[in-house]
Image (cartoon, rainbow, N blue to C red):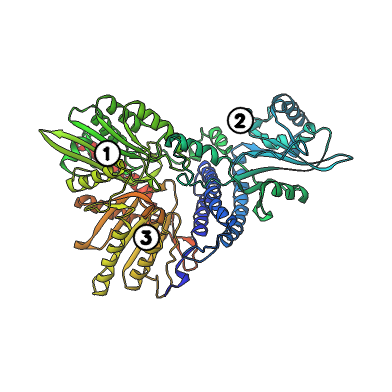
Amino acid sequence: MEDTRCYQNRELSWLKFNERVLEEAADTNNPLCERLSFLSIFQSNLDEFFMVRVGSLHDMMLLKNEVRENKTQMTAKEQIHAIIDETKRLTDKKDLVYADLMDSVKKERIILVKFQDLTEQEREFLEKYFTQEILPLLSTIVVGKKQPFPFLVNKGLYAIALLGTKNDKGKIGIIPCNAGVFERMVEIPSRPNCFMLTEECILHFLPKVFEKYKIQSKALIRVTRNADIDADSIYDEDLNYREHMAEVVKLRKKLCPVRIEISREMDERCIDSICDYLGLEKNQVFLYKSPLDFSFLSTIQSRLRSKPELFYEKRVPQRPQALAPGEMLLDKVMKEDVLLSFPFESITPFLNMLHEAAESPDVVSIKMTLYRLAKHSKVVECLIEAAENGKQVDVLVELKARFDEENNIEWSRRLEDAGCHVIYGIDGLKVHSKLCQITRKCDGKIVHITQIGTGNYNETTSRIYTDLSLITSDEEIARDAANVFQALSLGDVVDETNALMVAPKCLQNKVIALIDREIEAAKSGQKAYIGLKLNSLTDKKIIDKLIEASQSGVTVEMVIRGICCLQSKVPEYTNNIRIISIVGRYLEHSRIYIFGEGEREEIYISSADFMTRNTVRRVEVAVPIRDEMIKLRIRELFISLLSDNVKAREQMEDGSYRHVAAGDTPYNVQEELFRMAYENANSATELH
């Protein structure tokens, strides 16, 4: 029988993760400008959460869908209310962190001021600046019988006022504040590095805009809109699929609001009117003491760039330890498997391999799945070069990669124009796998080089996300990978595999079978073990199997950065499970599955988290590690992650997360892995 103590709600677990991000912004052990980055990440994370997750729940609530989620049995309405309460607690905490950060920024002689902080001369300057530079660019709206309430752009900043005259009390005036035509921060000439936010300037001078009215109440507001669109459910068969996705992107900008953020207390009549116009409840209004948009923090960081002590010490990805100086990956992998570990090792050897494949007369074809790409993608450049050199290039570009649709649409056009065969995903499923296969004809024999990774083919994120990439010439793995590509080209998925795990049909069941194997081992008195590194854990089938494993005596250790719907340390249920989360300088993104110890040990790396969307609603690939030295390396990596006592937080009995006690010797796993990467690169150089 299930015990609800063993589960956590997905959305509330995510908010706990974002609180860990906020804690990094508050942590004075982090350099000041990096703390500003964490604060910005906290906000952008929360924006996306409301746009996607709360948006989805909002849709369910509007449909009066009383379906309960399958772990804590909460309805959509109950989840939204719990989210709102927790978000208000977190944003109050965020306001305090922001105030503390601005005090620290002030010590570095950069100051954000309000109008009351200025001298008379400075006020005169601002009024003149507003009149000459800002006022001519403003669009003003007074809501009335002839002017309906305007469309408020998602995440746009607006000054809003309750206006009154002798005959008319209660009109609403609205002005967009981020038209993109004026600077976000106005510098006060008499005080270098002293600024006022432009939206605050606009808000102060509203009487100059609405001269015929009395300003009865005013504030800045920001609206967040639902962005959760099911692209397949609204597919129009008369449209080219790529053009359809472009329409989806446009539609997203117009979906219903799910949140209002406001900068100060306002007349209740005005708030009531706004909520009425936008179709929101009063509890969906969030009052802040900090700015509504933190994008200006990057300007402050730029101003402080000359002070390196305010930033992380520079780290440069190193030559992979598997490669000797000057050694080419394409040659190396024909002899033995190669593992790349980002960001500690450089992605350049992989890019060089693609470039070499594009030019090599031995290479017949290149096949690849693309999910998220850099804005200036060298990966795509290599694929285009290969196609132009007469290679067969088959590329699946996932146009449904959320918030990357426009970028992917543009790259797909360029690939097609170069002569690549481009596939745009498959019906009802996202292709999230990181799979590449190069086919060569050497001495009359066909050989395959297969690359399977945990992260995207993105040069930018490879420097800030921790990911693993296996490159192998193993023929059994190659056959499975070829079958995956063949199925995708037919708009289908594979039904069975030999070496790989491939969702949606051959991953969840194989994972459960391996957990069952460990359960049986524990029952027979053997030492049984499961080690998992994931971004998120929500799949109830796998969660329930892990609970059963714990009850059977299997030791389960997990490193889960974000959402975790499994509660550890519940007596008689999950007391054999330990869960930690690492939030630090680099985003922990790699997925590792370890089952068993000794001769029974099996290790996989994968693109798939244990979320239902990954295990049964996406095409994902997990690859077994067969090279003994690479297995040892990943095992040691996993042990290192569990040993972190600087950035690791452990899940406690009450579901909260607390920093692991540092003891006498602090151990920051990310810093240690970079130290080792530098050491390996230097020692290899000395040997050669």
Check contact, mark 3 vs mark 1: CB within 8 A. no
Judge depth for marks 1 and 2 and give the one in front.
Answer: 2
Regarding residue 545, the answer to whether it shows in the image is yes
Could you tell me which quadrant the C terminus lies in?
top left
Residue 682 tag number:
1
Q: Residues within 10 Å of mark 3 (few under 14, many from 20)?
A: many
Q: In front: 262, or 144?
A: 144
Cα–Cα gap, marks 3 and 1 = 33 Å
Q: Amino acid at mark 3?
A: Met
Question: Does residue 351 sit above or below 638 in this rendering?
Answer: above
Residue that protrudes farthest toward the right in the picture: 166
Of the two numbered discs 3 and 1 on the same chain, state the one appearing first in sequence.
3
Farthest residue, direction left: 443
Residue 229: x and y, percent?
51, 46
Q: Give residue 678's position: percent from left, percent from top.
A: 31, 41
Q: Which amino acid type is shown beneath numbered disc 2?
A: Gly
Distance (Cα) linking label 1 and label 2: 47 Å
Q: Is residue 41 above or below residue 616?
A: above
| Quarter of the image where one finds residue 649 | bottom left
Rendering coords of residue 210 (x, y %): 79, 34
Give me the C-alpha separation between circle 2 and circle 3.
45 Å
In the picture of the structure, the residue carrying the numbered disc 2 is 180
Q: Could you tell me residue 507's position as x and y percent? A: 31, 55
Instruction: Please identify the quarter of the rendering in which residue 281 is found.
Output: bottom right
User: Which residue is label 3 attached to?
Assistant: 558
In the shown orientation, is residue 255 left or right of residue 600?
Answer: right
Mark 1 or 2, nearer chain start:
2
Q: Secondary structure at mark 1?
A: helix
